[in-house]
Image (cartoon, rainbow, N blue to C red):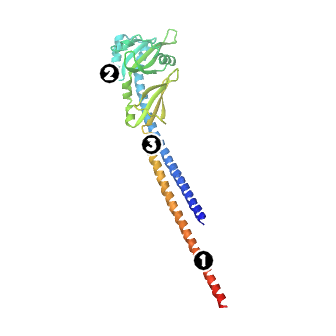
Amino acid sequence: MDQKRKMKRKYIRLKTTLVFIFIFLAVWCVIWIINQSQERREKLKATYTAESTVSRVESQLSKYLAESDLMKRIVEKEYDIDNEQFDKLAELMQEDEDVIEARELAEDGVVSRIYPMEGNEAAMGLDMLQNPARKKEARLARLSGEYTIAGPYELVQGGTGALLFDPAYITDQNGEEKFWGFSILVMNWDNFIQEVELEKLEEAGYDYQIWKKDLYTGEKIVIDESENSNLNNSLEVACSVPNDTWYFEICPKEGWYSKSQLWLNSLLSALLAVLIAMLYWQRRMRSYKEARYAEKIKKSAEEAKAANTAKTGFLSRMSH
């Protein structure tokens, strides 16, 4: 009988353990679904943030392209413009401009005119089609006929910048298009980054990285990134620019959901599972004890009935 009771208690403990595991897993699954829903919401929010930033980048580049295009059109219309006229026109476009540090014309790819000249003397005579750091983008712009951004890198005149190559073509005497050269904008990269307000991403709690692939090797080239680039499970948005693609990776600093939240959810799951398992244990043990008590009462009644039957039989025999 004792062995039977031990087996019964062991069976209750086993079922209680199974209840704990089942409840823990069920609660954890519910929490996981909630976290996935939260992650989707956060990714939609991050996508909107990234796409808004990409739109600002594209908008600013289009603005600078329009400025570069004016010089290009003058060249393509074959207007005779001397150095003084070039300087006056460039000066007008340079007013209230912090991003564009210089405007250049490069006939046959060789820089021949610069505004302002002061501080940019080192760039004069630079052959964009032969310079190792610039020739890839310059040649691509020439072949495609589309403007192309090179950099950011160290400029020969000092500082970090990017070059916007806008190829110009003229029609020769035979009516055929001939490559004339480039209208070039020299961009102050730090000021450009400030203008597109990338720092607001960090203020909003995001880590980010903008990068592109080397045109020849496919190697990753980082254009800009946050101070702490913790980009585990990041969201990637592509930003198309002529002749290239920039990739924008973004991720919340704390992740799509925080580790502390994950631990808290695990603790809550465990506590709820323990509570329900204890309630189950108490209920089963109460039922077990009630069954044992009922069994004892039944046994006592049977023993009393047997004793009464024996007594009646004994008195019956004695009377005879």
Outermost residue on the top side: it is 173
The amino acid type, in three-letter code, at marker 2 is Glu
- Viewer-nearest of discs 3 and 2: 3
* Residue 81, percent from left and from top: 38, 11
Identify residue for label 3.
Answer: 259
Q: Residue at x 44, y 45 (%)?
A: 261
**Residue drawn where x is 41% and y is 14% of the image:** 105
Which mark is drawn over residue 193? Answer: none
Dot 3 lies on which element?
helix
Q: Which residue is mark 2?
A: 95
For badge 3, the amino acid type reads Lys
Where, quadrant-wise, is the C terminus in this rendering? bottom right
| SS at mark 2 in the image | loop
Q: Quadrant of residue 182?
A: top left
Instruction: Identify the residue at the far front of this view.
Output: 318
What type is the residue that disc 1 sits on? Glu
As measured in the structure, the alpha-carbon distance from the residue carrying label 3 to the one carrying label 2 is: 50 Å
Task: Report whether 7 appears left or right of 73.
Answer: right
Which residue is nearer to you in this view: 66 or 249?
249
Cα distance, mark 3 to mark 1?
Answer: 65 Å
Q: Position of residue 153 (x, y in %)?
A: 42, 20
Are the residues tagged 3 and 2 within 8 Å (C-beta)? no
Residue 257 or 92: which is nearer the viewer?
257
Q: Which mark is residue 303?
A: 1
